[in-house]
Amino acid sequence: MPANSYLTWLCLTSADQVIELLTLLLFGYSAAKSRFKLALFSGFLLCFTRPAYWFGYLIIMYLMGRQRSVGERKVRQIAQRGAALWVLIGVLSFNQLVFNSPNLSTSSSTTLFYSHQKFHYLSLPKFDMDVFLTNGKSTSAESVLLNKNELKFIADSTVRASLLSVLENPQRFVFAEIQKVDSYFFPIQKVPNLPGQYELASDEKSILIGEERLTWSLTIGYLTFAVYRAFWMLLFAGTLVWLALLLYSRSRFTEPERYLLIPFAAGVLPGLLYYVETRFKICAELLAVPLHLIALQNLRQLGKSSSFKNTLSLSFRRIN
């Protein structure tokens, strides 16, 4: 973790990040050890730190419930396989009764608007979206909806404005979604890439450069994180190779191989729906590190095995 300079900084400056990391590690440990009840409870707590984890939580608890309920009665199978779904329904029902809204987050509609605003593709991954999209008519849902008759059946004005922005700017939307995928899986840089203040001008024709905050401490921190992320990417590639070999050979996955990558992989879904920043996925990336090391060790042992070398030699002979 010390090599992961950004996560270290977040843990020192944000109590929420510490709680997220704690509950995620507990959830991952419970899943890897097949402790169903503990995984159900710790995953439930994890989803309160960041609602995006609901996707991974539902998938993991379904897989654990499916494995656990083999040979059980039908009612018990449904209860265990859908355990996380029943928890989610309970949370949505509670929110509706207490807050008159089933939303998992109070700012979800506003975030949805800024995530599909016409100039979102110019903000991330380079600039901080919250700072960049503060000026101009397109940053106001009311201005976007002015004199518009489309989608009037949608009551929430910010949700309606976000969908209108997508309909009116399909090319910008495509570029933004491509950037989200790229920002989630492939960068070695922190997202947003640059510290400091960069804003869209009021005329929406230029970018205003404010305080850049290009200090040596930040620069070294960003560089250290880039080195860490580059190594993580190499290990991630090895893990994908190992999992592909297991699928090809129809071998049985161990619990770490089955579960530890899911929170990170499932996080791309809320990333596409909303937006991608490193702080949203950095803990899930860390959870995958033990799996990377397991895959690396197994690949090394496979490379040393005589049967693998004979198979590889035979393949080269066929090619030649």
Image (cartoon, rainbow, N blue to C red):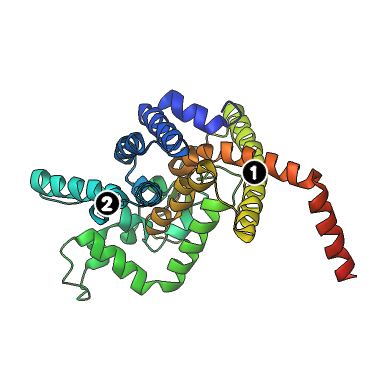
Report helix, strand or loop for mark 1.
helix
Q: Is residue 161 left or right of residue 32?
A: left
Report helix, strand or loop for mark 2.
helix
* Residue 285 visible in the shown view: yes
The residue at 59%/52% (across/down) is: 186
* Residue 194 visible in the shown view: no
**Residue placed most toward the observer, 22 or 258:** 258
Image mark for residue 69: none
The residue at 32%/39% (across/down) is: 40
Q: Which residue is mark 1?
A: 295
From what the image shows, is residue 89 above or below residue 286?
below
Q: Position of residue 117 (x, y in %)?
A: 36, 61
- Sort mark 1 into few (<14), some (14-19) or many (20+) by Cα contacts within 10 Å: many
The residue at 15%/64% (across/down) is: 155
Image quarter where the C terminus lies is bottom right
Image quarter where the N terminus lies is top right
Q: Position of residue 51 (x, y in %)?
A: 32, 45
- Sort mark 2 into few (<14), some (14-19) or many (20+) by Cα contacts within 10 Å: some
- Which three-letter amino acid code belongs to the residue tagged 1? Ala
Q: Which residue is mark 2?
A: 85
Q: CA distance from mark 2 to mark 1?
A: 31 Å
From what the image shows, is residue 115 above or below residue 285?
below
The residue at 80%/43% (across/down) is: 304
Q: Is residue 260 left or right of residue 132?
A: right
* Total tally of numbered discs in the picture: 2
Q: Is residue 288 left or right of residue 235?
A: left
- Which three-letter amino acid code belongs to the residue tagged 2? Leu
Q: Position of residue 23 (x, y in %)?
A: 38, 32
Q: Position of residue 319 (x, y in %)?
A: 86, 70
**Residue placed most toward the observer, 36 or 112:** 36
